[in-house]
Amino acid sequence: MSFLDNLENSLKSLESQDERGSSDRQQRDAERRAAIAASPWAEKLKNGPYTQELLKQATRIGFQMRAKVYIAWIGTTLKLEARERKLELRPTPQGVTALFIEPGKETRQQPVDLAGNPEELVRQWLA
């Protein structure tokens, strides 16, 4: 009798693993599709003139405020941090989004115009 119980338990565990595996696979596929859709924006953000000017303006304004601006690329996201404020530029399928983060919480987000003036974005972040 224990052999049959063991066999039944094994079959049930295999079925539950298969159900979990399909939902994980669907989630990975959705994330992959979103990353592919955002890839043109990520390329523009990483290699475009907007980012170079943004970094220049951030260090200039940070120097005027006597604050060190820390810059990091994590994947396709550009993260800037000065004092306790953070700015994240994230590519999405619709464009690039700026997230303003105060200590511990996201305060707001807005779309970024890569053809616009990055100094305005830096001033909004550090104001």
Image: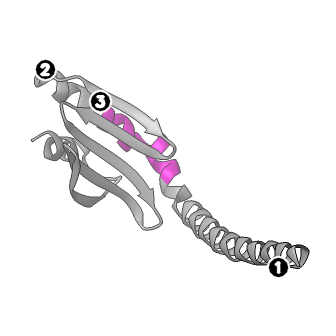
Query: Residue 82, position in %: x, y?
Result: 22, 31
Residue at 52% from the left image edge and 44% from the top image edge = 75
Which numbered tag is attached to residue 56?
3
Determine contact: label 1, label 2, CB under 8 Å: no
Three-letter code for the amino acid on which mark 1 is drawn: Glu
Residue at 36% from the left image edge and 31% from the top image edge = 71
Residue 57, placed above or below residue 50: above
Of the image marks 1 and 2, the number of the one nearer the N terminus: 1
Closer-to-camera residue (55/105) = 105
Give the residue number, with chain letter if any, for mark 2.
66
Query: Residue 117, position in %: x, y?
Result: 24, 47
Residue 12, placed above or below residue 83: below
- Check residue 8 for magenta coloring: no
Q: What is the crowding at mark 1: few (fewer than 14 residues within 10 Å), some, or many (at least 20)?
A: few
Determine contact: label 1, label 3, CB under 8 Å: no
Q: Which residues are magenta?
A: 42-55
Give the residue number, with chain letter if any, for mark 1.
8
- Check residue 45 for magenta coloring: yes
Q: How many marks?
A: 3
Three-letter code for the amino acid on which mark 2 is drawn: Arg
Three-letter code for the amino acid on which mark 3 is drawn: Lys
Closer-to-camera residue (52/36) = 36
Separation (CA) of disc 1 from disc 2: 68 Å
Query: Residue 103, position in %: x, y?
Result: 19, 42
Of the image marks 3 and 2, the number of the one nearer the N terminus: 3
Of the image marks 1 and 3, the number of the one nearer the N terminus: 1
Instruction: Locate residue 15: give its quadrant.
Output: bottom right
